[in-house]
Amino acid sequence: MHLWDPPFCGDLDMEIRTDGSWFYQGTPIGRPAMVRLFASILKREGDDYFLVTPVEKVGIRVQDAPFIAVDADIGPDEITFTTNVGESFTAGPEHRIVIRGTVDVPRPYVHVRRGLWALVDRKTFYRLAETATSDAQGRLSLCSGGVSFLLEPPLCPDTPPI
């Protein structure tokens, strides 16, 4: 799918909202299988999102991140996330955990695939925070897949979004 490069056919009245719900022409898409199908052909180019088939590419709107990380299996050396569309992956070099927002209101994300991110839901973030360890500077971090991830927003407020 990532190699497909069909012509752009215009924008579709489809939106993925902040809570991970998908809407078409203002109506929720209620069939999970349909949402999974659309998620499987979702592509990001810069700040734009598209549904891509071998013969066409249509633009859609994404309010924040296209996916929600709704669970995590937290082991001693790896953290395996599951998204709202059933994708699972282990955090590591290809699936980074980043924190945006502020210290008071952190917004945790994890990279899913090819520039697509998942917002980590609150309950899962709290579980991650419970298992985090403090480094020498007192910052909380987690290790997964041989990579250490800080569980706090960057100090620079101008850090680019995901």
Image: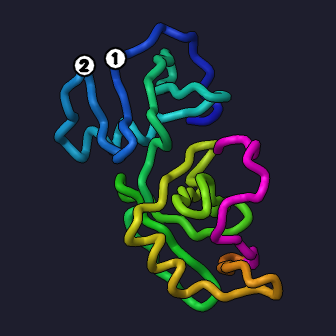
Colour pattern: rainbow
Question: From the viewer's perspective, is 114 left or right of 57?
Answer: right
Specify the amino acid type for callout 2.
Answer: Gln
Q: In the drawing, what numbered circle is on residue 25?
A: 2
Q: Nearer the viewer, residue 88 or 147?
A: 147
Q: What separation in Å lies between label 1 and label 2 (alpha carbons)? A: 5 Å
**Vertical placement of 122 versus 7: above or below?**
below
Query: Residue placed at 56% from the left, 35% from the top?
Result: 1
Magenta span main SS: loop
Specify the amino acid type for callout 1.
Answer: Asp
Q: In the drawing, what numbered circle is on residue 21?
A: none
Q: Residues within 10 Å of mark 1 (few under 14, many from 20)?
A: few
Q: Tell me residue 33's x, y (percent).
A: 25, 45
Query: Residue placed at 47% from the left, 8% from the top?
Result: 10
Label 1 sits on a secondary structure element that is: strand
Question: From the viewer's perspective, is 133 left or right of 29?
Answer: right
Q: Nearer the viewer, residue 9 or 110?
A: 110
Q: In the drawing, what numbered circle is on residue 13?
A: 1
Q: Tell me residue 13's x, y (percent).
A: 34, 17
Q: Tell me residue 117's x, y (percent).
A: 55, 49
Query: Residue placed at 38% from the left, 35% from the top?
Result: 16
**Residue 147, magenta (yes or no):** yes
Q: Quadrant of the C terminus?
A: top right
Stretch in magenta: 146-162
Query: Residue placed at 57% from the left, 10% from the top?
Result: 7
Q: Nearer the viewer, residue 152 or 3?
A: 152
* Quadrant of residue 154 within the rendered picture: bottom right
Give the total of numbered labels.
Answer: 2
Q: Residues within 10 Å of mark 2 (few under 14, many from 20)?
A: few
- Identify the mark nearer the N-term, 1 or 2: 1
